[in-house]
Image (cartoon, rainbow, N blue to C red):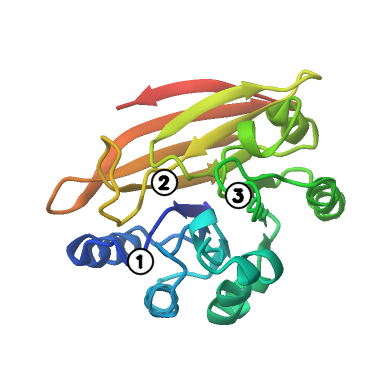
């Protein structure tokens, strides 16, 4: 059974060291097959913060796929870098992680999408080329595999028109996002009897909390079933806060048994 861990909004430069270590311990215990990180690895895109983030990635117990968040772009006080080289530090410090944004086997396809834009700091934006990329990757995917897309910004702001319909109708089963530091798990209907699951994670290990504890997502996939488990920080360890079960029939997902 494939297990995918979803982390977001690490914000190195504003992290709690105790939470960082507990997060690494919990991931080691949960043994995910792949870990995706949906942006904001740093607080201010400083070299020292990227170095901390890279050291964290090197300690992860599974392969990691990473996309940048708005905090990973060159800051506003460096306008020329912001305009002409917004992702230079991210690409340099993340190296192979910045290039490895697709995971594919016979049970799961995971596609990273960079929603950051230097002139759309808050909302982000996906381009038509991102949708073309999804089409290209999924064209060669096994029909029974779970199709996952992850990005930093929630699709409702990063895609114009009817964002979830666009992704669901392309065959995406699960969309992972962050940015708002709040947990959200829900079923979204597409336009043509299709649907997808949206799972937003809170900040994994930073002190930039927004009325929610640190946490991350753990997705258990046994197609046509999926369980989205949200794990939260108690002050001593991570534990299961919610479990949301879903089942797929054709191109349509529906709620299964919800376990709190």
Left or right, 186 with respect to 215, comes to: right
Q: In the rendering, which numbered label is found on residue 143?
A: none
Q: Residues within 10 Å of mark 2 (few under 14, many from 20)?
A: many
For disc 3, the marked residue is 151
- The residue under the point 62% across, 34% down is 157
- The residue under the point 49% across, 53% down is 3
Helix, strand or loop at disc 1? loop
- Pointer 3 with pointer 2, Cβ within 8 A: no
Left or right, 80 with respect to 136, comes to: left
Helix, strand or loop at disc 3? loop
Q: Could you tell me which quadrant the C terminus lies in?
A: top left
Inter-mark Cα distance, 2 to 1 = 19 Å
Q: Nearer the viewer, mark 1 or mark 3?
A: 1
Instruction: Return the x and y of residue 91 as percentages of the image width and height.
Output: 61, 75
* Residue 39 seen anywhere in this rendered image of the structure: no
* Residue 77 seen anywhere in this rendered image of the structure: yes
């Amino acid at each position: 059974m494939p297990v995918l861990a979803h982390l977001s909004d690490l914000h190195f430069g504003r992290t709690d060291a105790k939470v960082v270590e507990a997060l690494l311990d919990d991931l080691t215990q949960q043994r995910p097959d792949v870990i995706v990180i949906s942006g904001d690895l740093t607080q201010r895109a400083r070299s020292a913060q990227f170095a901390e983030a890279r050291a964290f990635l090197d300690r992860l117990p599974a392969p990691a796929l990473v996309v940048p968040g708005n905090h990973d772009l060159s800051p506003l006080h460096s306008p020329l870098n912001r305009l002409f080289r917004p992702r230079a530090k991210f690409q340099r410090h993340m190296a192979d992680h910045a290039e490895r944004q697709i995971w594919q086997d016979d049970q799961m396809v995971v596609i990273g999408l960079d929603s950051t834009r230097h002139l759309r700091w808050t909302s982000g934006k996906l381009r038509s080329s991102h949708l073309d990329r999804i089409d290209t990757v999924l064209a060669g995917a096994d029909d029974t595999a779970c199709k996952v897309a992850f990005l930093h910004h929630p699709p409702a702001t990063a895609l114009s028109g009817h964002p979830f319909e666009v992704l669901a109708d392309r065959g995406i089963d699960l969309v992972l996002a962050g940015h708002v530091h709040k947990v959200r798990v829900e079923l979204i209907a597409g336009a043509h009897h299709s649907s997808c699951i949206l799972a937003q994670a809170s900040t994994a290990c930073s002190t930039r909390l927004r009325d929610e504890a640190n946490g991350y997502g753990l997705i258990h996939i046994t197609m046509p079933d999926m369980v989205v488990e949200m794990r939260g920080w108690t002050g001593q360890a991570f534990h299961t806060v919610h479990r949301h079960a879903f089942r797929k029939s054709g191109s349509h997902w529906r709620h299964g048994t919800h376990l709190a």
